[in-house]
Amino acid sequence: MSNTIINTARSILVESASLGSEAIMSGAWAYPFLGISYVASHPQLYKSVVPIVTKAALASLGITAGMFFFTWVPQVAICAVFSGPFAPIPATIMVLFESYLLVSFVTKSFFLSAGQDRLFDAVLLQQGNEKLVANGREIRTTSSGMKIMGKPLSFTKRFSSDGIIRYLVSLPLNSIPVLGTGLFLVYNGSKTGPAFHARYFQLKKYGSQQAHEFIEKRKGAYTAFGMSALLLNLIPIAGFAFNLTSAVGAALWASRLEKLHVDVNDKTDYRLEKQASNSQPDIPVQLN
């Protein structure tokens, strides 16, 4: 098993080296954090998802507490093989990762998916992308110019069995002191990042091949976004809420791409994407 972990770590290191500069230059790593500040400055966004947040918080609390109670001690014993006296540290990290996986499955399956789509669409509307949002949601405009969001015309699937398998296979990387957790974040961030733009690709009416090409041309950027979002999601209990703010950050990034008229066939200048002004008209939106 140790050889498998080492070989996996080596391959991820090679991939990380090739994506490093691209990830940094893209500035995409900042968007999950920008999503937090955006929600804080737009109270109507988080007020619209209070019922969802309440249910998800209770589920997250119960799952995380149960995972620590039942699995922490056995995993300390396993990690002691690689980490010796420092075993409690990687064991704690592993339990947090495992809790995140279960919380993600439960909350995305029953609570968060519709809320993420609603927030994503609302932010795009606020940033002046009505035509794009109209591809996936009913929109009405009042005489005062306020946009009223109606029923969704399509729904986004964000949770996949491939993601679960990838997550579980890479989980033992955390038993490697210090370096292992970083490798785990890179490995899973490359898949977590694109998932936050699933709604964007749906609104753009991209097929699976077009979406794949778009992601591959920005692989470093999506990996950077995914790593930041994953780090926030790992915060106990509150991680699910950051899943929602990361969806807002993903919408801000999508709005930036729309402003730059970036298409699936474009060769992206990441410095341009990073430096272009993100000032957009803050259009009043009512979330039903």
Image: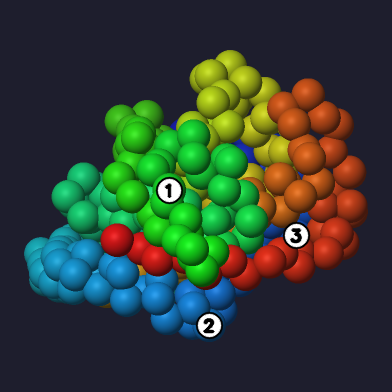
For residue 139, which numbered disc appears in the image? 1
Image x and y of residue 145, in percent: 54, 64
Figure quadrant of residue 126: bottom right
Q: Quadrant of the C terminus?
A: bottom left
Q: Label 3's element?
A: loop
Residue found at x 53% / y 82%: 41
Of the pair 170 and 108, the residue shown nearer to us = 108
The amino acid pointed to by label 1 is Ile
- The crowding category of the residue bearing disc 3, from other C-alpha atoms within 10 Å (few below 14, some 14 to 19, many at least 20), is some
Figure quadrant of residue 95: bottom left
Give the label, 3 or 2, closer to the camera: 2
Q: Label 2's element?
A: helix
Which residue has dot 3 on it?
A: 27
Of the pair 164 and 262, the residue shown nearer to us = 262
Lower sequence index among marks 3 and 2? 3
Image x and y of residue 58, in percent: 13, 72
Above or below for 93 versus 273: below
Which residue has dot 2 on it?
A: 41
Above or below for 33 versus 22: below
